[in-house]
Image (tube, rainbow, N blue to C red):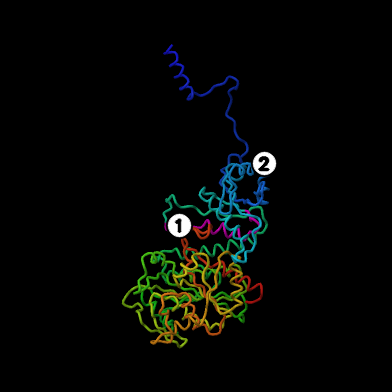
């Protein structure tokens, strides 16, 4: 009896490996699938949205119009499976597989409540920002599957959806080997179930321009020096009929650019003064001048920066990268505006020729400048450029640069600092930033700070005050001395140039390229009101 039971147990265990046979099925040739669609590799992704309102008692979730349409096409599978999971809130997503014969995977991203609109306190269009977040996290969630194309619905605003999806899926991978498993190919992103292709293209171009600025900021400093930056400008802009003029240190010296020459001679890399000119209007139209700080690596000179700061100083040319990207976008969009871009490119390195504590330089404005702290070099470059920009009789001057570290402690990554002498320009900048989600915050441009930088026995002004605090406002007050009567906006972007990946769900860790989209949107609004 014992042996019989053991034998039965062994038969049961072995039977799981046996091939089941049946006499009911006649033998014949293997069946072939005649429909090629069923055998095709489904490597396409789709991003849809869902609203969720916590204040609704029964069922507070509802798919977007495109989501409902797709749910009907797949026989209600999407909604049935979505109800089995917690409904994604804003910033969350769910991925579903094999719902239909076209898309291998579908991401459903949360949009929050349907009641989002412009928030006056936040100075932000929360509806558009929710769309960017939903499109961004949905597209990036599908990117890990390496799809050939990702279709993204408009969520009600195709431009914002294109921005979020394009920004979130970009990552700097230039110097990784092709065999590296971490490399994620850039999938083609297309609009789904909407006819607003014009808005989609504008949003994609704005995001692509910001990605270009991010790319330049991420470039290693041994590859991106003033010379290679100028070459990139020629390659990218000349094909769009944008004039690029590259001028040497000797030219700058002959134009009395004392600050630029003093900073540029500190490195073995020759400094270059690059001018880019886009003419979208007639020659009689006054241009808008864009000035971008272009220090390709900022060591701090003799005032050497801490190690943690040096690790991100390859991106100290963020202002120049933004100006290049903005001008390129204006040319592609064929905006009817004239733009003069000024890019003072140089390196600041500790050497026997670098500026020292207490040096005095002068510029074409006729004012002498006391270099109280050598590491505050960016404002010297911008000051020379502000004086030079008067030759163009501009309608407005915008300068962009990473100036003061203290903004990290006051504003964090929420907004860049904005200083201006024009209420009208500030209104346009503020409105544009609230629409793009890349906000700005106005800072004081008071005589209080002017008196601090004029408190100098050696020269007319100093590049910073004697006090340790208020350096961002001191910088703006210093630059104001060289503006004269032009309408002027100064963006201090030190605090927003780099992100750890927590500030915006659609911006991965690294350089940000801000405020590229805000300036492009501002030009759109100025043109709409015939101000340019």
| 361 vs 82: above or below | below
Residue at horizontal 68%, vertical 51%? 65
Q: Residues within 10 Å of mark 2 (few under 14, many from 20)?
A: few
Q: What is the x, y in percent for residue 417? A: 51, 71
Q: Is residue 421 left or right of residue 266?
A: right
Q: Is residue 122 left or right of residue 318?
A: right
379 or 196: nearer the viewer: 379
Instruction: Tell me the residue that label 1 is attached to.
Output: 173
Secondary structure, mark 1, is loop
Q: Quadrant of residue 264?
A: bottom left
Q: How many numbered badges does the structure rendering display?
A: 2
Quarter of the image with the C terminus is bottom right
Residue 75, disc? 2
Q: What is the x, y in percent for residue 20? A: 53, 23
Q: Quadrant of residue 452?
A: bottom left
Q: Is residue 409 left or right of residue 147?
A: left
The nearer-to-camera label among 1 and 2 is: 2
Q: Residues within 10 Å of mark 1 (few under 14, many from 20)?
A: some
Whether pointer 1 and pointer 2 mark residues with C-beta atoms closer than 8 Å, the reply is no
86 or 23: nearer the viewer: 86
Residue at horizontal 56%, vertical 75%? 339
Q: Is residue 326 magenta?
A: no
Quarter of the image with the N terminus is top left
Q: What is the x, y in percent for residue 309? A: 39, 66
| 280 vs 114: above or below | below
Residue at horizontal 51%, vertical 59%? 507
| The residue stretch that appears in magenta | 153-175
193 or 331: nearer the viewer: 193
Residue 254 visible, this orientation? no
The earlier-in-sequence mark between 1 and 2 is: 2
């Amino acid at each position: 009896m014992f042996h019989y039971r053991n034998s039965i147990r062994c038969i049961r265990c072995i039977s799981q490996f046996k091939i089941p046979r049946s006499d009911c099925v006649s033998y014949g040739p293997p069946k072939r699938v005649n429909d090629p669609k069923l055998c095709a590799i489904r490597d396409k992704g789709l991003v849809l949205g869902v609203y969720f309102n916590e204040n609704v008692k029964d069922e507070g979730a509802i798919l977007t119009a495109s989501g409902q349409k797709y749910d009907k096409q797949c026989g209600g599978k999407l909604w049935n499976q979505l109800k089995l999971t917690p409904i994604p809130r804003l910033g969350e997503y769910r991925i579903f597989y094999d719902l239909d014969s076209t898309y291998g995977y579908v991401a459903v991203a949360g949009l929050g409540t349907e009641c989002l609109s412009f928030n006056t306190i936040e100075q932000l269009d929360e509806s558009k920002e929710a769309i960017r977040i939903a499109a961004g996290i949905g597209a990036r969630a599908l990117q890990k599957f390496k799809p050939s194309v990702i279709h993204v619905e408009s969520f009600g605003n195709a431009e914002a959806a294109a921005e979020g999806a394009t920004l979130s899926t970009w990552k700097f991978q230039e110097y990784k080997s092709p065999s590296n498993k971490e490399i994620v190919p850039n999938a083609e992103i297309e609009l789904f179930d909407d006819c607003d292709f014009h808005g989609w293209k504008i949003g994609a171009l704005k995001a692509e321009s910001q990605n270009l600025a991010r790319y330049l900021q991420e470039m290693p400093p041994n590859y991106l020096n003033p010379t290679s930056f100028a070459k990139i400008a020629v390659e990218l802009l000349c094909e769009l009929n944008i004039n690029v003029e590259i001028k040497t240190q000797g030219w700058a010296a002959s134009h009395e650019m004392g600050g630029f020459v003093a900073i540029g001679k500190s490195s073995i890399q020759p400094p270059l003064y690059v001018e880019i000119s886009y003419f979208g209007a007639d020659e009689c139209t006054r241009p808008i001048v864009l000035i971008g700080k272009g220090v390709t690596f900022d060591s701090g000179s003799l005032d050497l920066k801490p190690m943690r700061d040096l690790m991100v100083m390859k991106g100290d040319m963020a202002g120049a990268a933004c100006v290049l990207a903005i001008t390129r976008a204006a040319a592609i969009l064929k905006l009817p505006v004239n733009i003069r871009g000024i890019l003072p490119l140089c390196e600041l390195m500790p050497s026997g020729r670098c500026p020292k504590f207490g040096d005095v330089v002068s510029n074409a404005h006729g004012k002498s400048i006391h270099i109280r702290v050598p590491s505050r070099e960016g404002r010297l470059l911008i000051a020379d450029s502000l004086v030079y920009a008067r030759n163009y009789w501009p309608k407005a001057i915008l300068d962009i640069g990473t100036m003061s570290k203290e903004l990290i402690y006051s504003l964090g990554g929420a907004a860049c600092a904005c200083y201006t002498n024009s209420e009208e320009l500030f209104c346009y900048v503020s409105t544009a930033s609230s629409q793009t989600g890349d906000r700005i915050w106005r800072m004081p441009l008071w005589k209080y700070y002017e008196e601090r930088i004029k408190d100098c026995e050696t020269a007319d002004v100093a590049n910073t005050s004697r006090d340790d605090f208020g350096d961002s406002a001191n910088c703006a007050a210093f630059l104001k001395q060289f503006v004269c009567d032009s309408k002027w906006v100064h963006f201090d972007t030190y605090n927003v140039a780099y992100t750890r990946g927590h500030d915006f769900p659609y911006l991965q860790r690294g350089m940000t390229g801000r405020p590229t989209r805000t300036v492009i949107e501002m030009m759109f609004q100025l043109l709409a009101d015939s101000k340019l």
